[in-house]
Amino acid sequence: MDFLRPASWEEALAAKAEHPTAVPIAGGTDVMVEINFDHRRPDVLLDLNRIGELQEWEVGEETVRLGASVPYTRIIERLRGELPGLALAGHTVGSPQIRNRGSVGGNLGAASPAGDSHPALLAAGAEVEAVSVRGTRMIPVEEFYTGVKRNCLEADELIRAVHIKKADGPQQFSKVGTRNAMVIAVCAFGLALHPETRTVKTGIGSAAPTPIRARAAEEFLNAALEEAGLWDNGRIIPPSVARQFAELVSGAANPIDDVRGSAAYRRHALGVMARRTLGWTWDEYRGNERSARCA
Amino acid sequence: MAQSTSSVITLNVNGEKRTLPVDHRTTLLDALRERLDLTGTKKGCDQGQCGACTVLIDGRRAVSCLQLAVAAEGREITTIEGLADGDQLHPVQQAFLDLDGFQCGYCTPGQICSALAVIEEHAAGWPSAATTDVRPEAGVPPLTADEIRERMSGNLCRCGAYVSIVQAVARAAGVETAQAAPALPQQGRTEEGTAA
Amino acid sequence: MTTTRPLLGSPMTRLEGREKVTGTARYAVDYPVDRVAYAWPVPAAVARGEITAVDATAALADPAVLAVLSYENAPRLHDTDDRTLAVLQSPHIAHRGQFAALAVATSLEAARGAAAAIRVAYAPEPHDVILTRDHPGLYKPDEVDEGMPTDREHGDFDTVYARAQVRLDAVYETPPLHNHPLEPHAATAMWDGDDLTVYDSNQGATAVQHVLAELFGLATGKIHVINEHVGGGFGSKGTARPHVVLAAMAARVVRRPVKLALPRNQLAAVTGHRSPTIQRIRIGADTEGHVQALAHEVTTQISALDGFVEPAAVVSRVMYAAPNSRTTHRVTRLDVPTPSWMRAPGECPGMFALESAMDELAIACGVDPIELRVRNEPTVEPDSGLPFSSRHLVECLREGTRRFGWHDRDPRIAGKHEGRLLIGSGVAASTYPVYVMASHAEAHAGPDGSYEVHVSASDIGTGARTVLTQIAADALGVPLDRVRVRVGSSDLPPASVAGASSGTASWGWPVHKACTELRQRLEALGHSVPEQGLTVAADIAEDLDDREDYARHAFGAQFAEVQVDTVTGETRVRRLLGVFAAGRILNPRTARSQFIGGMTMGLGMALLEGSTMDPAFGDYAERDLASYHVPACADVPEIDVHWIEEEDPQLNPMGSKGIGEIGIVGTAAAIANAVHHATGVRIRALPIHPAVLMPPLAGARQASPS
């Protein structure tokens, strides 16, 4: 196994172009598990740890450009104001040791349906910056996942960064597992309110072959909130609306029975998480609105 | 670039520089154990699922089984062997010893390295999943027993020494009374907000 | 010279503690060894069949690879009783994951790579891997465990049960459970001529020595097994396991020392586990809850290679006065991994069933569950009719009642809410037999006033080294720092396995005997030690034969408080309390850790742990620590442990009962009973996963007017 350690991003892209089968590795928390058990035996590893800019982030007007290798602990520590949903999801990734090394870039590269960052990215709205010697393309995260552990990267492309919409409203992340910590999600759910566009976005993990948005649920809720003027009047969401939203979220999933949980339980739990996260975020939104009015 | 399968690297372990050729497939864990005779770091799963191989890399805890040795070059690595000052145990080691925070001892080096990091991470204001108020302006949460439990959850102990481990971390962190606080259900949140 | 406080009963810190917290304690593959090679096994990829070809060409292409072993070329072994140890001896595959080949190389990486490159071809045969209550292969084994009768019958169960005022008939199930010690099974093997030295992770160096001698056709004196530090075992290292045989075989073939540490994902198939059990319990009682008839019928499995028959009904021969009773075991042979011991084999799953049933009976009779147990307290051991050497179950229940605040408990089901959480509490009894096994020890007095005590004991984290030092110093009447106890080597006087909670009694007794005699001999010599020192050897075989007939058991009571999330079905344990009566507690510090450790594993059994047999592939789906959930720190609440000091002269010179296993007995029932109290949902098949609890919980919520 060859081990390439490019010193710069340009070198990395050149190396990836020359060795399209090279597997990029940064924190190693996804790739190494596969290598240690011979699930994967790459001829070439492309170590991205020397490329400083992958560990950096820029907070712009609208988005955070998050370097592919920024570890979860940095996100939790430094970006929980801008990316609250992702920071909450980050808290539940693997173990604290894994969070010190693991990154969103790794999660996207692995594209496991159980990856914890995906629901948060889907709910916040994000684009993957995929770069090759041929150029750069921005891939909406919804289109990034193409199958179980598959993504749409070309063989010569590397993930440079993820551009994530800065939170313009409350965000939540919820995960059900059978252990209190260090647990692979039985299923997970992310929800973000976007008061600026008066929309709600969602993300579902571990309940379909790929991470997905519950689009019908979003459309229903957007219409219901608009119709009742709730974004303006700040009233509580009628229980019937919350219930319907939860049912549509459950219905969006396409889960399987496995040792972590049954499909029926996953659907049930998704509905619960949808209702809960909606309740929490809407309460926070109303609170913010009230204090804004008082100020 | 020519294909090669090994490299000569210099590892900085416990303040000492060690130069050695390594197979590119060699993990930091195996390099420590099989090449440098630093066998205090244990292999429990080789998949990042148990924490027995926890070391500090540039001051932060990481599982050495998911770290390639060749990629660890230039980093400062601290293992269990590097904690005591001669015969003087590190306070975390002393607390584990005094409070019987282990039985078979196999997970212990990882637990202790993790505990060191927990105390530092907490002091630096990092929240955890057990932190109820994670807003940046909320400040450092008190290091309660629940906080310690959550923060120490990357290290499995099959002997079931967690009760004493939590006490040992609390003592080493100087918050010993925290262990007396009963585990409370999550406060500050109603069941589903007011929406449902 | 005087000691200020008695050595027995003092909370001495672990003697090897400093080594463990500094990382200098060496485990089986931690010893630096020159020219060491590494071995990596290849598990069989069919559930049953024949190996038709082993192609090692690609593996051997790497010059770092020293050998590839399979049944085709592996050295022949002599026979032993344990057929799981006949590694690489036959092309027949008895279960998926059984070793099919072994790669040996000069580096760990090369060995792993070679193992992955070995191509094994199979002729698969149909397999049968799922246990059912009516499995056609069920039969009555000759005995369960060693010497325990398979079935017992007292009085006329059928008639009395049929006429009983209150009848309970329920089936309880426990899943396959895996020990998963944090240190995977591992060995370093080295040959020097016909002498074999192995550093091995096991619970009994003497036992492993004997088996290796048998397999390799050598005198036991040629085999040296060292297990100075062992990273947990919980039964899975109680006898020699295949890894040590493979390591020794490989070392002989490549003529170099060989290290073999099993990868975690191979453990589930080859190191033993607790069999699944299906247990039908029927109780006939009067309306006051007096048990008149009790039947405990167990269905379980072994493998095509035999294995341990889980004696789960045995507890019903000990616990409660039932004039009419039936306890039976039926077993079937499946194409599955071979079951073995896991912490409190028999008692642990058996008491989940019995103590759940007692809770159901209490509710059916409207009697407090503690009072129900008190009412059924026997005067002699129900099955044998023998008097108990000591039995303080009632005292444990009473003490626990007080400490837990049981009297404040509202007996109504699903009566306590905190928001979306339902809160409940439950109780269960614990029991574990007092075992002691023949062992030897030697005590040596040096002319400088120091003492050395030798016994081939195994400290797998129990604190054996420490408590044996306390026993020795106490018997010698000298301070602790004058005594050095050596354990962890088969070159020491032969001793029994660290299992069946018997270590302290089995090793402590000969240590006590040797030290007592040494003290007397030194006193006779006027305390002048001869230049060459003075050594006394002791053997307790006769002492064991001379013991009077008593039923000897430890007892305890476990209390649990849980919260159940009514919308997600998640259960969390809020607190656990255990009160035990286990003879004299010789070291309160290590004893507390043992009790708490057992209860923690019991919590895992209740809520988290279970292995799923994949019917199509014939292996356990959970083969790593991400899918087999042992409790993490965040799962474990405050656990409170107390004990009642017992003075029992019928045990051993120290007056101790074993404490390593009783902590796991009853915990799962206490938690399941608490879940029922919280929710009204009775879970009779463990573990209590949200996916299991949610459907009935949702049903119960809809049915209730709230």
Image (cartoon, rainbow, N blue to C red):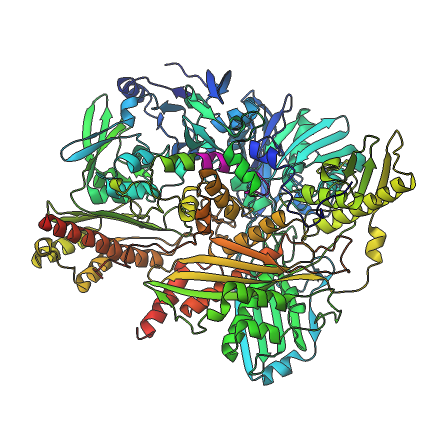
* Residue C605 image position (x, y, % from top left): 51, 55
- Left or right position of C621 against C582: left
- The answer to which quarter of the image holds residue C552 is bottom right
Question: Is any part of residue C410 visible from this angle?
Answer: yes
Residue that appears at 72% across and 57% down: C146
Q: Where is C1 relative to C55, above or below? A: below
- Which one is nearer the viewer's eye here, B78 or B172? B172
Q: Position of residue C405 (x, y in %)?
A: 49, 66
How far across and how far down the image is residue B2, in percent? 39, 14
Q: Quadrant of residue C59?
A: top right
Q: Is residue A49 above or below residue C486?
A: above
In which quadrant is the N terminus of chain B drawn? Answer: top left
Q: Residue at x 53, y 56 (%)?
A: C640
Total marks in image:
0
- Note whether B24 is above or below C694 in the view shown: above
**Looking at this view, is C621 or C409 the one in front?**
C409
Left or right, B86 with respect to A62, comes to: right
Residue B108 among magenta residues: yes
> Is A53 situated above or below A101?
above
Q: Quadrant of the C terminus of chain B?
A: bottom left
Q: Which residues are magenta?
A: B101-116
Evaluate whether residue C440 shows in this view.
no
Q: Residue C41's image quarter? A: top right
Q: Nearer the viewer, residue C47 or A106?
A: A106
C51 in magenta: no
Question: Relative to the observer, which residue lies in front, C108 or C540?
Answer: C540
Residue A79: x percent and y percent?
25, 36
